[in-house]
């Protein structure tokens, strides 16, 4: 922090300091980032969502009509745009001068925007430095500058999941807390690849949660792909071991492994995930080829902590951020990108099959800042 900010950034520093500890406290309250929460899990629908597009899902996330695709993305981000972005806009309403009051209001908006305190701080510092150097001297320029910064941060993590089809099955281990959207995301990915003619297997590795295996089976039947399941309460590692063995034997091309988000045993979740992870490698040394962490965007800043916790247990190679359509906290995508630097593979903007999109930073930022205003 520069000396100048040190003086006038009292508010910011207070929040910054408080934000750090409060995050951790509040996460403890929601019990360890929501992982292994004693709260009853959010009710996940057992039934697949009625969706006529299931059969004609595309292997590419882009719907045939690009304009429609962008429109859907834009409406998927409505809540975040009407929250975070509108708040940014309002900072400058009626203010043509970038005075201290405006800068302080900008601090407040960034800090409370679910983008993570560290990221908020970086954005603010970049803006205030340029204001000082007189490179930015009106609100429109600040908005433009923020848009560029945000796009840069997100571009750094734009990396769609590339499924390598070779002589071995490509194995994706899917992680996340209960209710984050793992099973739905697996179904969406499976539908795409099945529609492209691939041989797809879903492994029902969430053997502990009532109804979880059945949910996978309903989806798989609908999509027309194979499910491998164990007996009730089976050890997930043994289910996974057998599934991979079978996938190799029967030439499956893509194996999607669902895992538990909370266990009803005394085995800590993270230990269980590590064991499942090791087991895959025993049968197929390269597996899992992808460790996809599914995060519910409406968790807000907790999502960043959650991602850290999972990443410490197993090396997460990609993130799918779900439920962007239902929250104004979509700015969390910035915190995850900027603080963890893990590729964002997919975003979920609804419950339907084609509501899973390959993450594209440019499209995302355009949709987020979409407005009729001339400076956008
Ligand atoms: N609105 C919306 N709902 C989603 C999205 N992804 C998943 N869901 C819903 O979230 C709920 C929990 O999903 P589920 O896949 O069962 O979560 P899991 O416990 O992690 O396997 C279900 O009702 C899904 O339909 C999304 O991108 N947008
Ligand atoms: Mg599930």
Image (cartoon, rainbow, N blue to C red):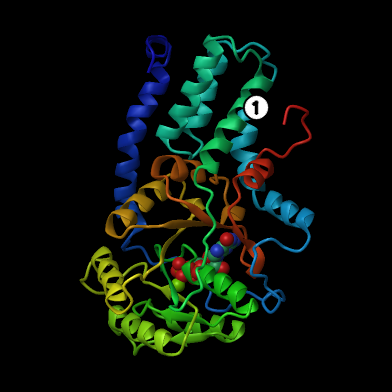
Specify whether 209 is left or right of 48.
Answer: left
* Circle 1 residue: 144
Locate residue 40, reporting x and y percent: 38, 67
Vertical comparison of 365 with 375: above or below: below
Name the spot of residue 19 as percent of width and height, x first. 36, 33
Percent of width and height locating residue 190: 55, 75
Mark 1 CB near ligand 1 (8 Å cut): no
Residue 88 percent across, percent down from the top left: 61, 29
Which residue is more in the foreground, 137 or 115? Answer: 137
243 vs 175: above or below:
below
Tell which of 329 and 182 is nearer to you.
Answer: 182
Element assignment for label 1: helix
Relative vertical location of residue 59 with respect to residue 143 in this rendering, above or below: below
Name the residue rendered at 31%, 82% in the picture: 241
- Relative placement, left or right, of 43 versus 27 is right
Asked whether residue 44 appears in the rendered view, the answer is no
Task: Please identify the quarter of the rendering in which residue 80 is found.
Answer: top right
Left or right, 264 with respect to 206, comes to: left
Q: Choose top left, top right, bottom left or bottom right for residue 222.
A: bottom right
Quarter of the image that includes the N terminus: top left
Residue placed at 59% from the left, 45% from the top?
A: 361
Task: Examine the image and state in which quarter residue 205 appears.
Answer: bottom left
Q: Residue most toward the left? A: 266
Q: Nearer the viewer, residue 283 or 176?
A: 283
Q: Residue furthest front?
A: 167
Residue at 43% of width from left, 38% of height from top?
116
Relative placement, left or right, of 269 versus 253 is left
Can residue 318 be seen from the camera position used here? yes
User: Which residue is drawn at the image coordinates 73% and 56% (left, top)?
Assistant: 69
């Amino acid at each position: 922090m520069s000396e100048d900010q040190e003086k006038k950034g009292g508010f910011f520093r207070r929040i910054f300091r408080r934000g750090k500890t409060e995050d951790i406290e509040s996460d403890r309250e929601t019990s360890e980032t929501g992982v292994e929460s004693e709260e009853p899990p959010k009710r996940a629908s057992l039934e697949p969502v009625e969706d006529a597009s299931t059969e004609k899902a595309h292997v590419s996330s882009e719907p045939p009509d690009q304009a429609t695709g962008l429109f859907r993305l834009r409406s998927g981000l409505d809540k975040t745009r009407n929250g975070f972005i509108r708040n940014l806009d309002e900072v400058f309403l009626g203010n043509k001068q970038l005075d201290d009051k405006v800068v302080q209001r900008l601090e407040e908006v960034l800090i409370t925007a679910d983008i993570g305190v560290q990221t908020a701080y970086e954005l603010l510092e970049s803006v205030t430095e340029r204001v000082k150097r007189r490179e930015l001297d009106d609100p429109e320029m600040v908005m433009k500058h923020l848009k560029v910064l945000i796009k840069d941060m997100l571009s750094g993590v734009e990396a769609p999941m590339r499924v390598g089809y070779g002589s071995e099955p490509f194995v994706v281990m899917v992680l996340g807390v209960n209710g984050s959207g793992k099973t739905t995301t697996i179904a969406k990915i499976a539908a795409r690849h099945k529609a492209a003619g691939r041989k797809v297997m879903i492994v029902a590795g969430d053997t502990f949660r009532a109804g979880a295996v059945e949910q996978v089976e309903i989806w798989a039947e609908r999509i027309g792909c194979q499910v491998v399941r164990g007996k009730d309460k089976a050890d997930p590692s043994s289910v996974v071991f057998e599934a991979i063995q079978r996938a190799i034997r029967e030439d499956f091309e893509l194996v999607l492994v669902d895992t538990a988000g909370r266990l009803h045993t005394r085995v800590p979740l993270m230990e269980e995930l590590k064991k499942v992870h090791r087991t895959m490698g025993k049968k197929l040394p390269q597996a899992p080829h992808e460790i996809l962490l599914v995060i519910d965007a409406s968790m807000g800043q907790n999502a960043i902590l959650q991602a850290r916790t999972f990443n410490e247990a197993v090396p997460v190679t990609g993130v799918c951020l779900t439920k962007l359509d239902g929250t104004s906290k979509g700015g969390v995508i910035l915190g995850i990108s900027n603080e963890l630097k893990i590729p964002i593979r997919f975003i979920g903007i609804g419950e339907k099959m084609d509501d899973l999109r390959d993450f594209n930073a440019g499209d995302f930022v355009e949709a987020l800042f979409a407005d009729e205003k001339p400076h956008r």
